[in-house]
Amino acid sequence: MSHRELTASELVAAYATGELSPVEATEDALQAIEDRDGDLNAFCLVDADRALEQAKAAEIRWRDGNPIGWLDGVPSSIKDMFLTAGWPTRRGSTSIPADQPWDVDSPVMARMREAGLVVLGKTTTPEIAWKGVTDSELVGITRNPVNPAMTAGGSSGGSAAAVAADMGALSVGTDGGGSVRIPASFCGIVGLKPTHGRIPLFPASPFGPLSHAGPMARSVDDTALLLDVIATADPRDPAALAPPVSTFREAVRRDVRGLIAAFSPTLGYVDVDPEVAAIVAAAVKSLDDAGLQIEQADPGFEDPKPAFDVLWSTGAAKMLDSFPPGSEDRVDPGLRRVWEQGKTYSASDYLDATAARAALGIRMGEFHTRYDVLITPTIPIPPFEAGHDVPPGSGLSEWPEWTPFTYPFNMTQQPAISVPAGRTASGLPVGLQIVGPRHSDDLVLAVAKLLEEVRPWVVR
């Protein structure tokens, strides 16, 4: 195994013994970007000079025995939806000029700096992170490291591709309808959407109650370590939760055997690809064999897409209304349709959708009085050809139609994690989703860790 393939936890262990330095690890990650990103297009900005400066500072801290955190010196990246002082945040849009002051760090970026992470650059996103694949007029198509003919998923596809291709061990994405979990599933990595408010956001997202940030990594341990860093309180988010009372890096060690998990293969209404269904079912059986008590049960709600569409499109329209004149002609054509749709809804329509979201949350709250976690496929299909918003030939017209397992849990604001479950016969990754009650981020991490232990996964 080369140094670039080490997880964040393994890198830090090597720093502690002196076997490896943050500078060497950063040089390896930058070389991986040079080797692979021409094909994958995971990064929209790479700042090698700044990264090496950060790595040299971390190297000195490790040499002196004074690292400033559990991830000090680990090469990482951040999605181009987060403000980053000194770098443009164009959100995948040609309507956002790079030539303007960029002097504010988002809470996520600020916490990453404070913890000593080496941030290599910013990862690609579709325009304003609006869809489940990653392509834009600004930066082009992001491809899957497992098979570059296929999509990496989205909207945090650049982050997932970067982690899967060893272009940094960690990344942070955003998730308003599945945007961390979709690409995590497609690229074969771990991606967590924690409880809403667990990771502070600034500025506030127009997608409001749907919006989450989430850590992405090649292991559950690394995901927990990164969550410990970025879940720190920030006064700029009035919806942020209180700081965690314990660490997530310890929570992954919790013994979950004996807990009761509901396995819902279809949520009662989803058409799942047979190969995906078989892979997920086999992974669930492994969890059952390991001592998690599995019962097959559906939560009992109908597809909430109509309400999601209102919440999503009105949020998009609110953001796009602030764009410069003429943006209507420049934005992604699919996004323009969402923009126009969002303008048709009234405040009453929005409140009706909010009421539907609340009812769904109540339904899931009751469900979790009987089941500790809910397990589903992450995505009902394998990765499909890059450059398309929906699978070619599927007859579908909108990205939420092929992501029915993810967006309901943005509406309920529950923690949900995608963990690799296996591969198709053609080698494409398939993810399994674990959903817990609100505020149970520690529990979903612990169940994910059990799956990782009983079905070891290598991202290649």
Image (cartoon, rainbow, N blue to C red):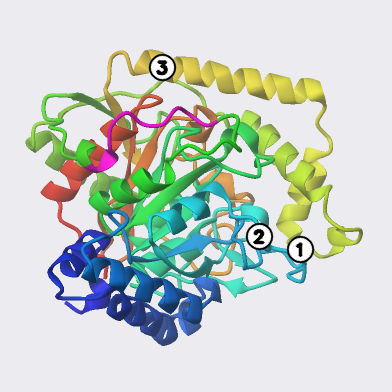
x, y (%) of residue 259? 17, 24
Q: Amino acid at mark 2?
A: Arg
The label shown at residue 91 is: 2
Q: Which stretch did the figure color magenta?
A: 240-249
For the point 40% across and 81% down, the residue is 30
Whether label 2 touches label 1, CB < 8 Å: yes
Q: Which of label 1 and label 3 is nearer to you?
A: 1
The residue tagged 1 is: 96
Q: Mark 1 touching mark 3, by CB under 8 A?
A: no
Q: Is residue 124 left or right of residue 37?
A: right
Instruction: Report whether residue 91 is seen.
Output: yes
Name the residue rendered at 61%, 54% in the picture: 129
Up the image or down, 209 lies above or below 166; here it is: above
Q: Residue furthest right?
A: 325
Residue 29 relative to residue 249: left or right: right
162 to 302, vertically: above or below: below
Say which label, 1 or 3, has the lower sequence index: 1
Give the residue at x 50% y 27%: 412
